[in-house]
Amino acid sequence: MKAYKIKELKNFMSRLLGGSVFDIFLLAEASITTCNTFIIDGHINKDFFADEVNDEKNLPPYEFSMWQDMRSLCFDLIKGKRTPLGFKIVLHLKPELAESLLNDHESAVSLNDLKAFVLNIKYDGSELACITATAFHTFIPDKTPDQIWDEYMIKFFDQNQISYELC
């Protein structure tokens, strides 16, 4: 787990809310505080789709909503003349990308062990930080997935011109 202080807030927010850079993620949850506090639970309610043909292809493929589908909602809550008082966005790397990442590094930990590679984005009204985490289904003494995830996020930030400093 590492924490990264984002140096250029406007640049980061443009990439987070204005483009497809973060579309490799699923939205687990979001809390956005402006004139009210808005809480978004990213879990998919599969019962919502019950009226559709009972075909697995019509159901969303993930446990959580895709960031690309929720980005505009979050943008609408954040945009305006006034800066939000704060927000927290919890993103999970899409499972197929997490599996690929583990396989590329020949990790002994499988996707069955890993619940998610997590990116927590926290803004307190003045500073924005990104904190990496790994979530497992059970205790795993192997810290290799943590290292893989931290290395990946550094490359991700660098490739997408997101400037940061380690906290």
Image (cartoon, grey):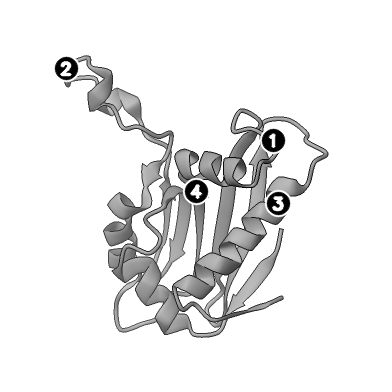
Q: Mark 4 points at which residue?
A: 93
**Camera-nearest residue between 164 and 31:** 164
Tell me which numbered mark, 3 or 4, is placed earlier along the sequence: 4
Name of the residue lying farthest toward the top: 54
- What's the residue at 34%, 67% (across, down)? 17
Report the quarter where the C terminus lies. Answer: bottom right
Marks 3 and 1 sit apart, C-alpha to C-alpha, by 11 Å
Q: Position of residue 67 (x, y in %)?
A: 37, 52
Disc 4 element = strand
Circle 1: is it few (<14), some (14-19), or many (20+) Cα within 10 Å? some
Q: Which amino acid does the dot numbered 4 rest on?
A: Leu
Q: Residue 53 carries which label?
A: 2
User: Which residue appears at 31% of the width and 23% of the height?
Assistant: 47
In the image shown, does 74 or 17 lie closer to the viewer? 17
Which is nearer the N-term, disc 1 or disc 4?
4
State left or right for residue 148 relative to residue 160: right
Q: Mark 1 points at which residue?
A: 109
Q: In whole angstroms, how far apart are the C-alphas of marks 1 and 4?
A: 16 Å
* Identity, as a three-letter code, of the amino acid under mark 1: Val
Q: Earlier in the sequence, mark 2 or mark 1?
A: 2
Q: Is mark 3 on a helix, strand or loop?
A: helix
Tell me the quadrant of the picture where the N terminus can be found.
bottom right
**Residue 38 image point, x, y percent:** 40, 57
Which of pointers 2 and 3 lies earlier in the amino acid sequence?
2
- Residue type for callout 2: Val
The residue located at (48%, 39%) in the rendering is: 95
Q: Is residue 2 left or right of residue 89?
A: right
Indicate the secondary structure of the residue bearing disc 2.
loop
Please report contact status of discs 2 and 3: CB closer than 8 Å, yes or no. Answer: no
The alpha-carbon separation of the residues under discs 3 and 4 comes to 13 Å
